Amino acid sequence: PAENIDGGAKLLRELLLRYQNHPDQVRLALAAYNAGAGAVQRHKGIPPYRETTTYVERVLNKYRARRTPAQDSRPAPAP
């Protein structure tokens, strides 16, 4: 499990760096994590796969739900 978590975190970091200059950086990174970077490239954005679009929104909703009011008033940290 520890290796799996470490590998997933490293992949997500790489994807965030790949899309760092895109306004939808986090959404694209999450989509690439789920569907693969090739699918994001082929579709020039989030692939129209139900599983992927649901995954991206589910992760973002969970992230937003865990943020505190103090975190919402500060800019998001750079990846």
Image: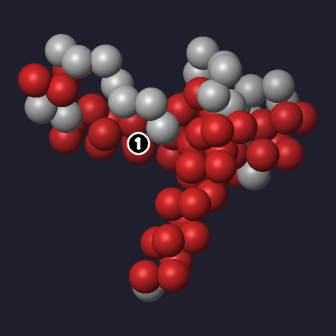
**Image location (x, y in percent) of residue 9:** 51, 60
Residue at figure coordinates x 60%, y 15% from the top left: 23
**Image location (x, y in percent) of residue 69:** 10, 23
Tell me if residue 52 can be seen.
no
On the rendered structure, is 40 left or right of 58? right
Provide the secondary structure element on which disc 1 rests: helix
Residue at figure coordinates x 37%, y 30% from the top left: 77
Tell me if residue 44 can be seen.
yes
Between 51 and 12, which is closer to the camera in this rendering?
12
**Image location (x, y in percent) of residue 79:** 48, 38
Quarter of the rendering containing residue 19: top right
Between 55 and 30, which is closer to the camera in this rendering?
30
Quarter of the rendering containing residue 2: bottom left
Residue at figure coordinates x 31%, y 18% from the top left: 75
On the rendered structure, is 34 left or right of 77? right
Residue at figure coordinates x 45%, y 30% from the top left: 78
Instruction: Establish if 53 lies above or below 10.
Output: above
Kind of residue at badge 1: Arg
Instruction: Establish if 43 lies above or below 10.
Output: above
What residue did someone put label 1 on?
58
Q: In which quadrant is the N terminus drawn?
A: bottom left
Q: How is the image coloured?
A: secondary structure
**Image location (x, y in percent) of residue 22:** 66, 20
On the rendered structure, is 42 left or right of 16? right
On the rendered structure, is 41 left or right of 47? right
Q: Label 1: few (<14), some or many (≥20) within 10 Å?
A: few
For this orientation, the residue located farthest to the right is 42
